[in-house]
Image (cartoon, grey):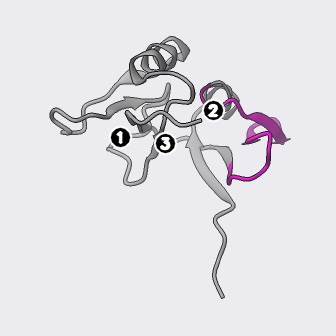
């Protein structure tokens, strides 16, 4: 017997805007909106956990203890980095030093990593 990972809940000061960012990053679609503030997105194939963005009033103040790792799809890491920056990501320093991954933050400051390995 085991549990299944079905949803990743993300606290946000502006859930619709943050959901839009992650939809563009991942190529996912909106699958639900609740009360005008809670937004759910999922991959079109429905094979991965959904992300649910919920409103919170307190600001993010420290490094996340959990983060998302991304691999470029059909592009080199440098190309994908430029795309993510154009979407609103920003470089982040969490003390990673010189690594082959890039640490970024989404528009609300949540850290995530762009790995080097390209996947299809």
Q: Name the residue that disc number 1 marks.
A: 61
SS at badge 3:
loop
Residue 11 relative to residue 76: left or right: right
SS at badge 1:
loop
Q: Residue at x 69, y 29 (%)?
A: 27
Residue toward you, 74 or 53: 74
Q: Residue at x 79, y 44 (%)?
A: 45
Q: Residues within 10 Å of mark 2 (few under 14, many from 20)?
A: some
Query: Which of the image's four quarters has the N terminus?
Result: bottom right
Q: Name the residue that disc number 2 marks.
A: 26
Residue 10 relative to residue 7: left or right: left
Q: Indicate the position of residue 55 as horizontal and vertical percent values.
A: 64, 42
Q: Residues within 10 Å of mark 1 (few under 14, many from 20)?
A: few
Residue 67 relative to residue 50: left or right: left
- Based on the picture, tell me whether residue 84 belongs to the magenta stretch: no
Q: Indicate the position of residue 81 as horizontal and vertical percent values.
A: 43, 20
Mark closest to the chain's N terminus, 3 or 2: 2
In magenta, the rendered stretch is 25-50
Distance CA(mark 1)–CA(mark 2): 25 Å
Q: Name the residue that disc number 3 marks.
A: 58
Q: Residues within 10 Å of mark 3 (few under 14, many from 20)?
A: few
């Amino acid at each position: 017997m085991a549990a299944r990972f079905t949803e990743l809940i993300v606290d946000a000061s502006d859930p619709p805007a943050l959901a839009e960012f992650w939809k563009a990053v991942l190529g996912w679609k909106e699958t639900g909106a609740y009360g005008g503030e809670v937004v759910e997105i999922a991959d079109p194939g429905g094979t991965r956990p959904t992300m649910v963005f919920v409103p919170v009033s307190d600001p993010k103040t420290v490094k996340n203890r959990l983060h998302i790792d991304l691999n470029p799809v059909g592009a080199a890491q440098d190309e994908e980095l430029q795309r993510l920056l154009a979407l609103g990501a920003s470089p982040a320093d969490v003390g990673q030093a010189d690594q082959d991954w890039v640490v970024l933050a989404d528009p609300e400051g949540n850290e995530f990593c762009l790995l080097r390995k390209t996947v299809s």
